[in-house]
């Protein structure tokens, strides 16, 4: 077998031309990575216009007229949302614009106007436009305890305190804002702070003395500050 007349093929001779061919082929240039501009809120909605309507209570016409420019300026100029008062329907109407930067601005503005209608000051309600984790929680005294006549009046008095002292103390301790409109209570703040304020108000409705509620409130707020 070693002295056979069969031709011997060399591996080097066959591989050499292949390597030359690979060297001759120029490198293929990849296309540049595309850069897409972020979609605007108007483009996300495919050009559709969104609306919100906030009803105006009859007793809020005069205050709304006085504070209209304070409400109109941040909504129209900062949030880029169209706003108008429909006198016939008695509603504040809000509408998106082509230059509205975010979809969520419309709902924020609707919450801001609704908070003002519930009785919050414009200075307090405007925080809904600037912060994301603020909410408005509403409940009635009858949801906690069924009270009628003088018992209901005394419960409302316990919530407010002398000259609003109790209400202000709860607001300052929990960093919330509270509106007591007859038997309805509205709380503006973050989720955790609303829960603390609501627990304190419920204790007052159920008949706890203000001093006991203050001490419990101080303990809870101190515990929360230590946890953070």
Image (cartoon, helix red, strand yellow):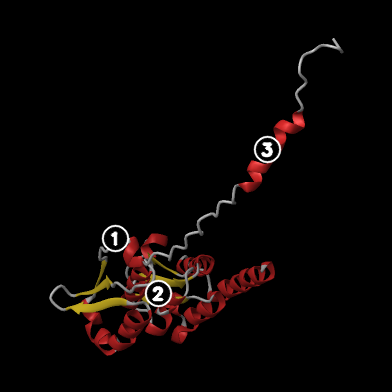
Tell me the residue at 50%/66% (across/down): 203
Location of residue 228 by image quarter: bottom right
Q: Work out whether 2 lies above or below 142.
A: above
Residue 148 or 109: which is nearer the viewer?
A: 109
Foreground: disc 2 or disc 1: 1
Nearest to the observer: residue 4 or residue 75:
4
Point out the tag, 3 or 2, that comes first from the N-terminus. Answer: 3
Mark closest to the chain's N terminus, 2 or 1: 1
Mark 3 sits on what residue? Answer: 17
Q: Quadrant of residue 112?
A: bottom left
Residue visible at 74% across and 32% down?
A: 13
Q: Earlier in the sequence, mark 3 or mark 1?
A: 3
- Secondary element under disc 3, as helix, strand or loop, is helix
Tell me where residue 34 appears, x and y as whole percent.
47, 60
Q: CA distance from mark 3 to mark 1?
A: 59 Å
Give the number of the disc on residue 121: none
Height in image: 95 above or below 161?
Answer: above
Tell me whether the residue at label 2 lies in contact with that at label 1, contact meaning CB atoms closer than 8 angstroms. no
In the picture of the structure, the residue carrying the numbered disc 2 is 156
In this view of the protein, can residue 145 be seen by the observer? no
Residue bearing the label numbered 1: 46
Count the labels in the image.
3
């Amino acid at each position: 077998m070693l002295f056979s007349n069969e031709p011997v093929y060399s591996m080097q001779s066959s591989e050499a031309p292949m390597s030359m061919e690979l060297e001759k082929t120029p490198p293929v240039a990849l296309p540049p990575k595309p850069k897409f501009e972020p979609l605007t809120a108007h483009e996300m909605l495919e050009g559709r216009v969104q609306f919100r309507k906030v009803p105006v209570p009859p007793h809020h016409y005069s205050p709304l007229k006085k504070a209209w420019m304070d409400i109109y300026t941040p909504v129209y100029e900062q949030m880029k949302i169209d706003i108008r008062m429909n006198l016939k329907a008695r509603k504040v109407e809000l509408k998106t614009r082509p230059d509205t930067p975010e979809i969520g601005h419309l709902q924020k503005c609707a919450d801001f106007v609704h908070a003002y209608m519930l009785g919050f000051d414009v200075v307090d309600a405007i925080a809904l436009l600037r912060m994301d984790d603020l909410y408005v929680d509403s409940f009635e005294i009858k949801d906690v305890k069924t009270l009628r006549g003088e018992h209901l009046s005394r419960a409302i008095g316990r919530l407010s305190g002398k000259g609003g002292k109790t209400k202000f103390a709860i607001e300052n301790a929990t960093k919330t804002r509270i509106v007591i409109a007859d038997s309805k209570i509205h709380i503006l703040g973050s989720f955790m702070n609303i829960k603390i304020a609501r627990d304190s108000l419920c204790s007052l409705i159920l008949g706890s003395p203000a001093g006991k509620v203050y001490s419990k409130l101080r303990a809870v707020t101190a515990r929360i500050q230590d946890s953070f």
